[in-house]
Amino acid sequence: MTLLGNSYPPSAGAFRDDIRWFVDPIVGFLSSVNAPLLANIYTYFSYRDNPGSISLPYALMSSQSVSVWDNGLGYTNLFDAMLDATYSAVERVGGWNVDVVVSESGWPSGGAGEATTMDNARAYVNNLVAHVKGGSPKKPNKFIETYFFAMFDENQKDPELEKNFGLFYPWKQSKYNVYYGATRDWNVVPGSELSNATSSLVSAT
């Protein structure tokens, strides 16, 4: 995401001019071989750096209301906005057929930082799982291939914040439940009980 010179609104997404010399050929190659671009999308860092303009529910994907309207498309969460800004940037340099795979995403459950709590990490991860099947406003009904960072906490990593992105502790104990296969209508709000989910949960296939 640091390669984007503009990401708001999502339709105005564009790569920075100073890196176009190497990004454009990469996108061109990916387009020629029909391969995806990998992008690391962390709503946490955008929220941390802009708490005055980005709400926590918008970053956690817990909001049910539209926060951003862009050319008729409504955005209820920051993840979609960042993803679609990346799509816009790729299209702007000719990669109309290039898919974007989210190669990393996650939320820290601890460490010295804004909103780094277990509840927030659990909410973000479960909301993201429930969301990716439905696509983004720019690419509706298109499954978003997404990978979590990370499987385990990295207890020897610095700074402290970076130690706490895992779904498991270093000793292999899970930190919280992750419900795969949830529908998009089910949202986890920090502090709520998972048993309050109103939509049925199905097993991942």
Image (cartoon, helix red, strand yellow):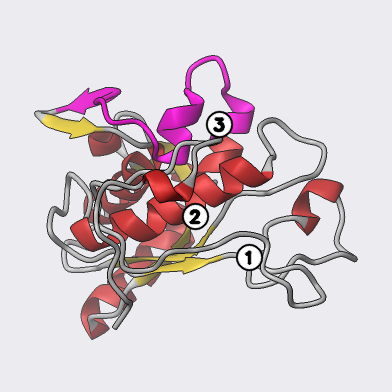
Which residue is nearer to you in this view: 142 or 122?
122
Asked whether disc 1 touches disc 2, contact meaning CB atoms under 8 Å apart, the reply is: yes
Instruction: Give the foreground label among 3 and 1.
Output: 1
Residue receiving disc 3: 47
Which residue is nearer to you in this view: 49 or 2?
49
Q: Secondary structure at mark 1?
A: loop
The spot of residue 101 in percent (x, y) is: 36, 67
At horizontal 67% and vertical 69% (from top left) the residue drawn is 174
Of the numbered discs in the image, which one, if any, rests on residue 125? 2
For the question of whether residue 3 can be seen, the reply is no
Which stretch is magenta? 47-70
Task: Give the alpha-carbon distance from disc 3 to disc 2, as whole Å.
Answer: 16 Å
Of the numbered discs in the image, which one, if any, rests on residue 167? 1
Q: Secondary structure at mark 2?
A: helix
**Looking at the image, residue 184 lies above or below residue 167:** above
Query: Which is more N-terminal, label 1 or label 3?
Result: 3
Task: Look at label 3 and name its amino acid.
Answer: Tyr
Asked whether disc 3 touches disc 2, contact meaning CB atoms under 8 Å apart, the reply is: no
Asked whether disc 3 touches disc 1, contact meaning CB atoms under 8 Å apart, the reply is: no
Q: Farthest residue to the right: give it.
A: 156
At horizontal 29% and vertical 83% (from top left) the residue drawn is 205
Which residue is nearer to you in this view: 114 or 68?
114
| Mark 3 crowd level (few <14, some 14–19, many ≥20, 10 Å Cα) | many
| Mark 1 crowd level (few <14, some 14–19, many ≥20, 10 Å Cα) | many
Task: Look at label 1 and name its amino acid.
Answer: Leu
- Image label count: 3
Q: Farthest residue to the left: give it.
A: 72
Q: Farthest residue to the front: give it.
A: 195
- The verdict on residue 199 being magenta is no
